[in-house]
Amino acid sequence: MSDSSQRMANPSDLEHLAKLFDGRGNLGDKLDEAFSRASRLGVRDKLAALKPMRSWTGETATDLRRRAAILRAEKGDPKAAAMRDSNRRNSRASSCLRTPC
């Protein structure tokens, strides 16, 4: 595959999209608010199909930030490469909290 056929993304756009997913007052917060309201109204079961979105928003935001760091590192940004390595270590450590390493 030649370089001209590879798709490229703007790292800033990926980070902005991640912020829309898990930033303060955005999709993650709106989902939490919807579930809280549904509970108060006694219709939480009607939102059952949306329950996987709660974890998906956080996981997707983390993945988008990781991809932005990779793109920046490929373009020669040494801070991005260091952040990418740090995020990789942190994600390994957090996965050990969920399951035995």
Image (cartoon, rainbow, N blue to C red):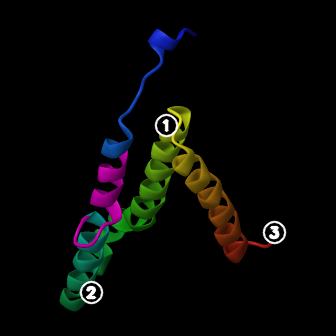
Q: Residues within 10 Å of mark 1 (few under 14, many from 20)?
A: some
Please give the residue where the numbered disc 2 appears in the rendered image: 39
Amino acid bearing label 1: Leu
Image height of 20 relative to 5, above or below: below
Give the CA separation, mark 1 to mark 2. 41 Å
Tell me which label, 3 or 2, sits earlier in the chain: 2
- Whether residue 78 is in magenta: the answer is no
Give the CA separation, mark 1 to mark 3. 29 Å
Task: Indicate the position of residue 79 as horizontal and vertical percent values.
Answer: 53, 51
Residue 7 location, quadrant: top left
Number of labels in the image equals: 3
Task: Indicate the position of residue 24 as horizontal and vertical percent values.
Answer: 27, 72
Q: Residues within 10 Å of mark 2 (few under 14, many from 20)?
A: some
Main secondary-structure element of the magenta-colored stretch: helix
Image height of 68 relative to 47, above or below: above
- Mark sitting on residue 71: 1
Q: Secondary structure at mark 2?
A: helix
Please give the residue where the numbered disc 3 appears in the rendered image: 101
Q: Residues within 10 Å of mark 3 (few under 14, many from 20)?
A: few
Q: Nearer the viewer, mark 1 or mark 2?
A: 1
Q: Secondary structure at mark 3?
A: loop
Amino acid bearing label 3: Cys
Give the CA separation, mark 3 to mark 2. 36 Å
Q: Secondary structure at mark 1?
A: helix
Numbered range of the magenta stretch: 14-26
Tell me which label, 1 or 3, sits earlier in the chain: 1
Task: Indicate the position of residue 78 as horizontal and vertical percent values.
Answer: 56, 45
- Whether residue 23 is in magenta: the answer is yes
Task: Indicate the position of residue 34 as horizontal and vertical percent values.
Answer: 23, 75
Q: Nearer the viewer, residue 3 or 75?
A: 75
Quarter of the figure with the N terminus? top right
